[in-house]
Structure formats: structure tokens, C-alpha cells
Amino acid sequence: MARQPDPEGRTRPDPGRGLAGAWQRGLAACVMLATATTPAAADPALWVARDADSTVYLFGTIHILRPGLRWLTPDVLRKLHESDALYLETDIRGQSRDLVESYGKDPDRPLTTTLDPEDLATVKASADSLGVDFAQIDPLRPWLAMIALSTAATEKAGYRLEGADIQLMRRAMLGKKPIRGFETAQDQVALLSGEAEARQVEMLMGSIEEMDRFPALLESMASAWVDGEDERLMTLILDSMEIVDEGFRTKILTDRNRRWADEIERLMDGSGTLFIAVGAAHLAGATACRRSWRKRGLLRSGSVR
């Protein structure tokens, strides 16, 4: 999130461009917040699906990284270079500030009205500890306030809201490759903004309770990701999602995985080579896209190293 100093020297979120560019990173922060020290030999998991005239590489990304993490292996770069296009969860180059204004702000019902006195005091204390001016987040709906505080906590811990997907996108842009998304920015905003207000408040308060766990969880998750240990990674991801109920986990993981697997199968009705990079949470565990591929007979080569 873009940040700027206030008159007392603290930092506060820029309610304009910063939030407009933060929800995809914030959504990822709700699903996983991962990074680590530089590994001796990075080996993030990469899968491939093939039919007679199509090849699709499927790569799980981390949306939030500590500067200096060397994860981009020569093999991943080579597969991206071989591909005709890059597919991401969404093409984040055109994120619109209007979506934040429409879905994320409610000046007529600020947090000071929405939250009960105890929760309001907790949110104010969390904002103060993170150097966030509460007046800047008061007009936000609870889901966006959660993202604002989670983003501030992540940055305070030394992480950047610029992950593997952003770096792959830049490589694709340099290579003049088409970049496409499975979802629109509005689709992604709707995942959180569509939750009932009471549920949004629960997630906001739950995220504040979990913030002390962030640093250790980040290190463990990144270690699993960089080493390609997707089952261990999924265990950690589910642990990080304890603040959300089963219905929301189904919506944010299972349902999206099913839609993306259907879309990937349609793409393979054509021909050529595609590189697909989505959050690693979507590739690990029993509901992963790749398992759907395997059931449909598309995943023939297993994990590529």
C-alpha cells in the first residue's frame, strides 16, 4: 500500500492509489502471507499439462515477498519464455480506484458506527501500533480496513507487497507477451465485499488477533513454497485461514479452482503454449486445479523440476 507521512511523522495509507492497488495483494494476505530468507537452491513446484497440440505450465506464486528472495529459477524463466501468453488470477495492470470507492468505502457508515466500543478500541490500538492514521481507515468498510491493517503489518515486518506474479508479469511485458486474467478486478473485490457486514467485522477482528503470528508464519510458508513442498504449504495456508469460515474458504479456493480448471480445459481445446501463474494456495491440497486436471486426464507429466 502506498504510504505517506502525517504531520507527526507517522505513516498512513494513501486512500487513493494505494488502496486501489492493494486489494489483490490484500486478498492474498488473507489467504497466505509468505516469504523467507534466500534458500540455498530454490525449487518451487511447476506442473505441466499436455494434449496433442497444447502445453500449459502451471506455477504457484507467492503474492508477498521479502526483498532479496531469489526464487526465479532458470527453468521457470525458460518455460515462461517458451510460452505464447501469461495468465494470472487477474490482469492487475488496470486496477481501478473507482472500485475501491464503490465497494470499499461507506462514509455514511464508518467504522466508528459499525464496530462496538470494544472492537473499535482494538482497531484504533492496532492502527496506532502500525503507524496508520485511524481517520484514514474510518470511512472504509470492514473488509477493506482489514486489508489496510494487514498490509501495514506486512510492510512493518519487512515484506513487500510485490510477489512472484508481479515479477513474472514484468518479464512477460519485457518479452511483449500477452497477459490475461482468469478474473476481473471487480470479481476479486466482490469476493470480500460481498460478505455480510457482520462477517467482515469478524474477519477484521480475527486478522488483528493473528498479526503477532505473521512473521513466523511467513517464514514457514515461504520455506515450503520455495522447496516445492505443496502439502506442507497447504497445511500452513489452512492454518493462516482460521479467521474465515468454511463457506468463505470454499468460495475463495474450491469454487475458483473449479472455474479456473474449466477455463484451462477450454484453453487447451486450442493450440500453443501457455504459462499460468496463480497463488500457490490454488495448487496445493485436495481441491487444487492440478488435481482436477489429473482427473480429466490432462496432467501427464507430473511436477516439472
Image: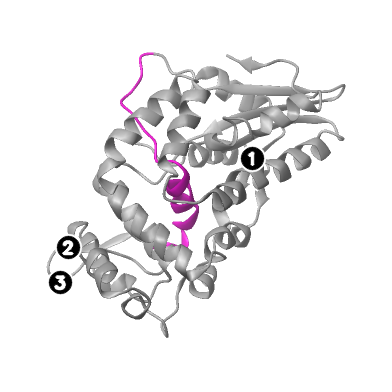
Label pair 1/2, CB-CB below 8 angstroms: no
Q: Is residue 206 left or right of residue 30?
A: left
- The answer to which of 286 and 264 lies nearer the viewer is 286
Residue under the point 46% across and 41% down: 63
Question: Marks 1 and 2: which is nearer the front?
Answer: 2
Residue under the point 29% across and 52% down: 209
Which residue, given by chain and number where applicable, does mark 3 sit on?
A: 7
* Residue 191 figure quarter: bottom right
**Which residues make up the magenta segment?**
17-40
- Which secondary structure lies at badge 1? loop
Estimate how packed mark 2 is, as few (under 14), some (14 to 19) or many (20 or more) residues with alpha carbons within 10 Å: some
Q: Position of residue 81 (x, y in %)?
A: 63, 27
Looking at the rendered image, the quarter that the C terminus falls into is top right
Which residue, given by chain and number where applicable, does mark 2 sit on?
A: 10
Residue 12, above or below 162: below
Q: CA distance from mark 3 to mark 2?
A: 7 Å
Q: Is residue 287 left or right of residue 67?
A: right
Estimate how packed mark 1 is, as few (under 14), some (14 to 19) or many (20 or more) residues with alpha carbons within 10 Å: few
Question: Marks 1 and 3: which is nearer the front?
Answer: 3
Which residue, given by chain and number where applicable, does mark 1 sit on?
A: 176
Residue 247, above or below 173: below
Residue under the point 41% across and 14% down: 41
